[in-house]
Each structure stands twice: as C-alpha cells, then as structure tokens.
Amino acid sequence: MIAERQRVPVLDVDATPLRVDDLVDVLGGLIAAGDSKTVLGHNLHSVTLLHSCADFRALYQGSSVVLLDGAPVAMLWGLAHRKQLSASGQGPMSYRLGSMDWIPALGGVQGLERVAVIGAGRDANTKAVAQLQSIVPGASVEGMPGEAWDDALEVAVVDWLKAFRPQLVLLGLGMPLQESVLGRRLAELPPAVYCAVGGAIEQIAGVQKLAPRWLGRLGLEWAWRLVLHPGRVAYRVFIEPWKLAALLIRRRLQPPHTEGK
C-alpha cells in the first residue's frame, strides 16, 4: 500500500490519512524497502512548530508518513475531504491515529523481526520492551532509556542502533526533542523505520495512565491530559492555539517570495 499525503488547508500542512490496518500494511512495505524512513504525527503543537521552525518543517516535509495525531487536525482534514469520507462511510476520527492506537497492532506488520525502543526512564523502558515483546512475539525487542538526554547519550544511542540494526525504532523523547534528534542524525543512522511516539513508551509500560480510547474518538483526550498533567498541558490547550492562529495569519499575509523562509 502506498501512503499518500493529503492537504489540511486551514493549517497549511500535509498529512497521511490512515487507519490502523492501513498503517500496519504501510509499515510492512517501508520495512521491506530497507532504507531509512520516518513516521511522524501532526497535532496542533507540531503544526505550530512546523510554521515556526525551518528544521522541523524540513523533517516533516521529507517524512514518509505524517499521521493525523491530534483530534483538531483530524477534524479539519475531515472538513476538507468530506466527499472522500462520504464515499468511505467513515468519519474523520477513524483516521485519527495516536501512537497508542497503532503500537498494539505491530504484531501484524509483515517481516518485523527487530524493534528498538528509545526513551523514558530505565524502569519504564524495560517494562515497555517486555510489553512490546508480547505484542510482536518472535521478534527481538531491545531498549535504551532516554532520561536526561544529552550529547553523550545521543552518541551512545546512535552507536547502539548501528550495532543492533533494528527494522523499526520507537523514539519517545517528547516533541520537539525526538524530531530534533531525527533531523540531526537520520543520515548517519542505520536503515530503519523511525517512528516519533512522544510519551507512548511510558504508556506502553503502564507508568503513564492512558486515556480511554473512546475519549480520543470524541476528540476529548486533551481534557484527560489536562486533568492529569495541568502544568504540562495547560499551555498547549489554552495558549498555543492562539499562537498558531497568529502564525497562520502572518503566513497568509506574507508576499509569495518570502514563503518558506
């Protein structure tokens, strides 16, 4: 299956609308291709960073898959592609894929034999590796904690990946650190499919409580996170949408020759 980008016009971004089974097929194809690819996700935070940081934008533009991660992004995509949704009989939230929507389905990825899990503290990483081992039975799953990430740890992780040579890498360092690492290091990393998964490693491990999936389908997962982690989430919920709106307005008012600078 070939993953095709589609425009989310209001946000001025491209994304790859996929359901879980579609993504499983796409991952199998990317692994079979044998070169380095990235799988990223779009939420309002990533859209804000894309419009304010050239390096972040370049990574997303070169990514093989950009999932509709956030509910607002999925809804806005749905508004722009109503005919497509009507023909398929699906609602836009059917294409909203957070990391924990598809990671439990990795056992269905054809040819997946080696998985690397990078991120979280040592205990959470160890638990996540054990859980992934049960999700992808028969595969070799190994992990490296990402806590207290610095230049020395980054070099150690690069060397470890070169020795392990995984086919699939779950990189959970939080946004934008994980994207920054991919932007800096992708060219020297061994061929694999590199997936930016944010806090999913702690969720796989059971360290961070996962919102009920029905809340995600209703577009209310942000409320769950706001209750559990108000200090971490409040800025993204109450302030960042206004910052993004200002960036989009300024982008539309720019003369054509300055676009993309």
Image: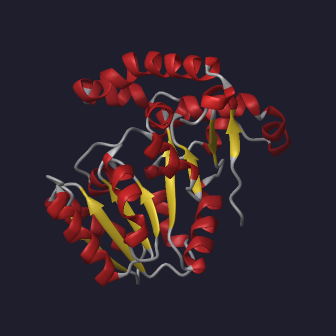
Question: What percent of the width, then of the height, locates residue 156?
Answer: 19, 70
261 or 42, which lies in front?
261
Whether residue 39 can be seen here? yes
Relative to 11, residue 192 above or below: below
Residue, x 49% and y 67% (percent of image)? 106
Q: How many circles with numbers are drawn on the protein? A: 0
Asked if residue 180 lies left or right of residue 119, the reply is right
Asked if residue 74 lies left or right of residue 155, the reply is right
Q: Would you identify the image quadrant in which residue 53 lies?
A: top left
Which residue of the protein is positioned furthest toward the front in this rendering? Answer: 257
Q: Looking at the rendering, in which quadrant would you find the N terminus?
A: bottom right
Relative to 26, residue 147 above or below: above
Whether residue 218 can be seen here? no
Question: What percent of the width, then of the height, locates residue 58?
Answer: 51, 48
214 or 22, which lies in front?
22
Relative to 154, residue 255 above or below: above
Asked if residue 95 lies left or right of residue 164, the reply is right
Q: How is the image coloured?
A: secondary structure
Asked if residue 221 lies left or right of residue 131, the reply is right
Residue, x 58% and y 17% (percent of image)? 249
Residue, x 83% and y 37% (percent of image)? 86
